[in-house]
């Protein structure tokens, strides 16, 4: 995926053991299609060599404002202006303090000061010992740089190079790149509260068996991620799947359809957009055996009596806020034949303004898909692509429809 194609990132390194992770950040950025210009403070060069960063970025590294390659002798001006974002990994406590004071004693803080603030975001991935992180001076400085327009990417919690354990570890490279993508993404869903259901449900027969289906949850997780990238506050209600939670998304894990419905209790009151991607089991065993059902010689297979599960989407779509237009409901339809015809009927039956149709057997478990969007205006096709790309396109389509309604 070339999510950063055409983007030029200024990657700044300050002093800290986490400099070794900046090498991986650089690699991920170039893999995502970005061009990268590395600038290092003198302290950073004590931890990792400019040669390594040059090799990974494919460009000579800047370490000083007196760089002889600069005809005008003003690297701080041109480096800050050619960048789409300035990303500092690792960002030391001292560097935050320098930013707070507007210091410009080295090239990196100097170019941060010289960057056009309205156009070039400044993202900081702090890395320091837990005591340094917790110190009131650091916390005060972090609040101040945020007020001055910088984005703090947060820190991890765990083992530290100094042997201690706590908050202050730098985020992992993939988390940092995800945050950068988020900072650069347009925000058509800013201010929206999005709830998404995803994955299969598991309907227990006894303590070891149950009824489920082959939904992987990938589409729903991708939509939750895309909605967060688009500026929404996102809650993801997930059936049993082994997928990592997208960054910045609140996740509620459930098993059965009934649990999923209970988890959605806040949705009807809170959400402005509801996207139902979950493959909710239509039926559930009337009784759950308390103990494992045992085979009995000659008795044959036990009869399984099923009862219908509640329809989550239809329930939410019937709520007052959905009917008044304050909550926009999006349903999915997984079909194996007559896609358009079944989807039209389903949209009416569920009472949703937008229904997204896809071919179930062709998408379950896969990383790609193709979608048909049905609403009052007609049918919109989102042709075959990765679920990540389709999720972004679907979120754009939802934002477009909300803007048209407003
Ligand atoms: N859905 C739901 N609760 C259910 C069943 C489905 O919320 N008990 C939602 C799904 O999340 C999806 C939409 O309804 O957004 C359609 O799901 P689908 O399985 O395609 O349709 P069904 O309602 O099961 O209808 P059918 O069995 O006729 O295909």
Image (cartoon, rainbow, N blue to C red):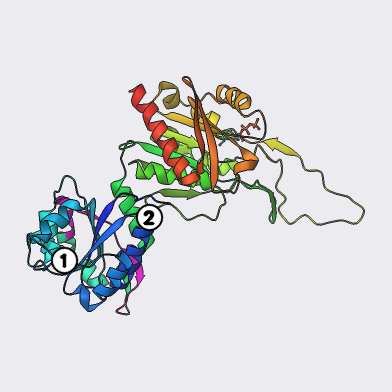
Q: Which mark is residue 76?
A: none
Q: Nearer the viewer, residue 74 or 219?
A: 74
Q: Is residue 238 positioned above or below 275 on the image?
A: below
Q: Can residue 289 be seen at all in this image of the molecule?
A: yes
Taking the image in four quarters, ligand 1 sits in the one at top right
Residues in magenta, as a range? 142-162
Local SS, label 2: loop
Q: Is mark 2 within 8 Å of ligand 1?
A: no
Residue ranking furthest to the right? 298
Tell me if 153 is positioned left or right of 303 in this view: left
Query: In x, y percent, where is residue 237?
Result: 49, 45
Q: Quadrant of residue 20?
A: bottom left
Neighbours of disc 2 within 10 Å: few (<14), some (14-19), many (20+): some
Seen at 29% across and 57% down, the residue is 35
- Of the pair 344 and 191, the residue shown nearer to us: 344
Residue, disc 2:
32
2 or 1: tag closer to the N-terminus: 2
Point out the image quarter for the C terminus. top left
Whether residue 18 is visible to the viewer of this picture, yes or no, is no
For disc 1, the neighbor class at 10 Å (few under 14, some 14 to 19, many from 20) is many
Q: Is residue 115 left or right of residue 236?
A: left
- In the image: residue 42, left or right of residue 161: left
Q: Nearer the viewer, residue 42 or 277?
A: 42
Tell me how far mark 2 sits from mark 1, CA to CA.
27 Å
Residue in view at x 44 percent, y 33 percent:
268
Instruction: Name the residue beneath numbered marker 1.
Output: 95
- Counting from the top left corner in percent of width and height, residue 349 is at 58, 23
**Residue 264 among those drawn in magenta:** no
Identify the residue shown where x is 39% and y is 41%. 227
Residue 123 in the image, given as x and y percentages of width and height: 24, 56
């Amino acid at each position: 995926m070339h999510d950063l194609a055409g983007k030029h990132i200024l990657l700044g390194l300050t002093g800290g053991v986490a400099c070794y992770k900046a090498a991986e950040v650089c690699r991920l950025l170039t893999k995502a299609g970005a061009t990268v210009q590395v600038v290092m403070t003198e302290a950073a060069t004590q931890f990792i060599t400019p040669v390594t960063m040059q090799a990974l970025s494919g460009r000579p590294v800047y370490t000083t404002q007196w760089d002889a390659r600069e005809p005008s002798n003003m690297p701080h001006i041109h480096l800050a202006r050619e960048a789409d974002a300035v990303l500092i990994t690792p960002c030391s406590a001292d560097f935050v303090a320098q930013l707070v004071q507007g210091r410009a004693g080295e090239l990196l803080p100097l170019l941060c000061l010289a960057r056009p603030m309205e156009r070039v975001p400044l993202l900081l991935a702090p890395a320091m010992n837990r005591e340094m992180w917790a110190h009131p001076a650091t916390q005060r400085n972090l609040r101040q740089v945020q007020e001055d327009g910088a984005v703090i990417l947060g820190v991890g919690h765990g083992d530290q190079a100094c042997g201690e354990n706590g908050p202050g570890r730098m985020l992992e490279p993939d988390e940092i790149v995800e945050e950068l993508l988020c900072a650069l993404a347009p925000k058509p869903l800013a201010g929206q509260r999005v709830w998404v259901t995803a994955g299969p449900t598991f309907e227990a027969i006894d303590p070891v068996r149950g009824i489920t289906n082959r939904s992987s949850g990938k589409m729903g997780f991708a939509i939750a991620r895309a909605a967060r990238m688009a500026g929404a506050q996102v809650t993801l209600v997930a059936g049993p799947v082994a997928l990592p939670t997208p960054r910045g998304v609140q996740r509620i894990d459930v098993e059965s359809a009934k649990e999923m419905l209970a988890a959605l209790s806040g949705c009807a009151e809170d959400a402005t957009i509801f996207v139902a991607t979950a493959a909710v089991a239509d039926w559930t065993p009337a009784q759950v055996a308390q103990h494992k059902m045992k085979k009995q010689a000659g008795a044959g297979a036990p009869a399984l009596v099923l009862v219908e599960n509640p329809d989550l989407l239809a329930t939410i779509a019937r709520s007052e806020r959905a009917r008044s237009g304050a909550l926009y409901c999006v349903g999915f339809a997984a079909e194996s034949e007559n896609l358009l015809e079944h989807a039209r009927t389903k949209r009416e039956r569920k009472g949703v303004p937008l229904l997204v149709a896809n071919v179930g057997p062709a998408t379950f478990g896969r990383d790609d898909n193709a979608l048909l969007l049905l609403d009052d205006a007609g049918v919109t096709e989102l042709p075959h692509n990765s679920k990540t790309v389709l999720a972004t396109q679907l979120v754009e389509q939802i934002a477009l429809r909300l803007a048209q309604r407003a």
